[in-house]
Amino acid sequence: MQQMQSASLHNSTRRTTNTKFNPNQRPNQVNHLASQKKISRINSSLLLLLPVTLRHRNIYLKVYAFLDTGSTNSYISQPTAAYIQLEETNHQEQLLIGGFFNSQTIEAKTVDFTVQSFGKNTLAFELTNVLIKENFNLNAAEPEKLNDICSQYDHLKDICFPDFSNNDVALVIGTDNIDIISAKTIIKGNQNVPRAVLTALGWTIAGPNNDIGYFSSHQATATPIQISTDDTQILDVLASIWRMETYATSPEITMSSDEIHAMQTLRKTISLYDNRYQLGLLWKPNANLPNNYKAAIAQYNRMKIQLTKNSEKLALYQNTIEQDLSKHYIGKLEPDEIPSTGWMLPEHGVINPNKPGKLRRVSNAKSKFKGVCLNDMLFTGPDLLYNLLGVITRFRKGKHPITAGIEGRYMQVSVKPEERKFLRFLWGAVEPEFFEYTRFVFGAKCSPTCAIYALRTCADDNAESHPHIKKLVYENFYMDDIFEATDDIDTAVKIIEDLRHVLKQGSFNLTKWITTDHRILQTIPEEHRSITIDEIKDPKIFKRILGMEYDGE
């Protein structure tokens, strides 16, 4: 819910046309709203999103709907319309869509279908002339997070979001269906906190969410780019794109003063201890955190009440604690080891509907106390990722593709002992006990940069004996995955052997190996393979690589 509604959905003016739609006919000049990675920080708010059921004939689909009072029309995403087999009406629309920065003329087709409230005692509404849009850049939050928010406010305690595996927003209902999106009842709490809103499609929550921490930052903008039939303008746009694509391959990368400060911390604090790299957190100058123990106790009590209502989830949560203790990812503290200073990380358990019986414990480094959180005190650090286009291009150069991932990447890098007090949390099925992370945690702002820096340092330290592995680590890793391709089997086997050997010097374990040749796969221990020898015959074993479809043939 931290996404900002697309400006292109607002202020549209309909121009009804009775002529047959000609896809090749377009205005002489078209203004496009192009998304760019330009960060704009604003306060986080929960939008009016709620789960609904779409119905067409005998096909039902559960999706999230956005009730948008700022949109004059209703929209459905094209993939959703295709999935429930909606038939386009004869009604054709030519829309002049106006946003905050620009306007855009598009041809749009319309569909009719039924939307139902989610759960028992459903109410159904017919939606007509709903416009088909390619997709929405909007996602709802996980029900677990929404329910956790509701549990923290008395006026929201009766609101419960159902388990819902798909959090993509597929429907926008605008003011052309005002009776559906209008608030029938609003339950308010204090100022600047979420409120409960009852609509014709059921209850949801909306409003400021600045003190919870799940959505404490917001990144979304649209930047207008004009594309016309003027060849000069087109060439200018292409030149800017090419400059952007070659940025990560430039030998000289300009860093901000904050990134320089973070890089100095990385170089100063890294060390190899007991076959594992150790780093300090990337603190901002004059960083200071209050003691948030009282807030942590309150959050722990709420979480324990929730878990005791679900014995299966409680057992899974306790199991993650025991596993992390056995792997030395966390340590349990005795009362005499607990200093008066430090920071407590709120935690909660998340179950992926696609992985039943598996729970992931999540630390919330954005949770605020007295107006600050852990991430407020940390630098992100410099971007050490290699250019994505280069990684993909090199992966396509050979006949034998190879991929693998580092097991628990963040958990393989240690935090300096004197700084672990800022990564503490509470747990205990009966009474609260103190634990602290000994490794970098998922969610801490600096964890990605620290993990990449430790991995590269491992390659640097072994570069004299394995220079080719250093090159691979720098150029063929993206996040925690390696992507390589060779033209012959012997080279692939040698690369796998050397890569596993070098990274083992820093306790980085490569696992979930995939390749397309059984002779390569046989050299990898079975427990580290992602596929079997039989599955390797399937040319579609590489389904998606870095978000792209990959054809193994």
Image (cartoon, rainbow, N blue to C red):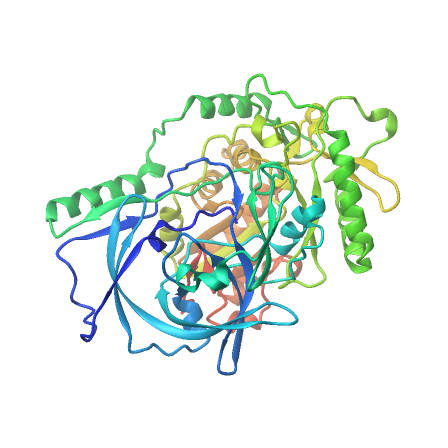
| Residue 273: image location, x then y, percent | 68, 29
| Residue 117: image location, x then y, percent | 57, 68
Position of residue 350 in the picture relative to residue 451 (left or right): right
Position of residue 392 in the picture relative to residue 59 (left or right): left
Q: How many marks can you see?
A: 0
Whether residue 166 appears in this view of the structure is: no
Instruction: Name the residue nearer the viewer: 355 or 202.
Output: 202
| Residue 413: image location, x then y, percent | 63, 36
For the point 43% across and 78% down, the residue is 85
Q: Locate the C terminus and report the quarter of the image it occupies.
A: bottom left
Quadrant in which residue 251 is drawn: top left
Instruction: Name the residue nearer the viewer: 282 or 56.
Output: 56
For the point 82% across and 53% down, the residue is 308
> Which residue is outermost to the bottom?
58
Whether residue 31 appears in this view of the structure is: yes
Position of residue 454 in the picture relative to residue 298 (left or right): left
For the point 64% across and 63% down, the residue is 353
Quadrant in which residue 314 is drawn: bottom right
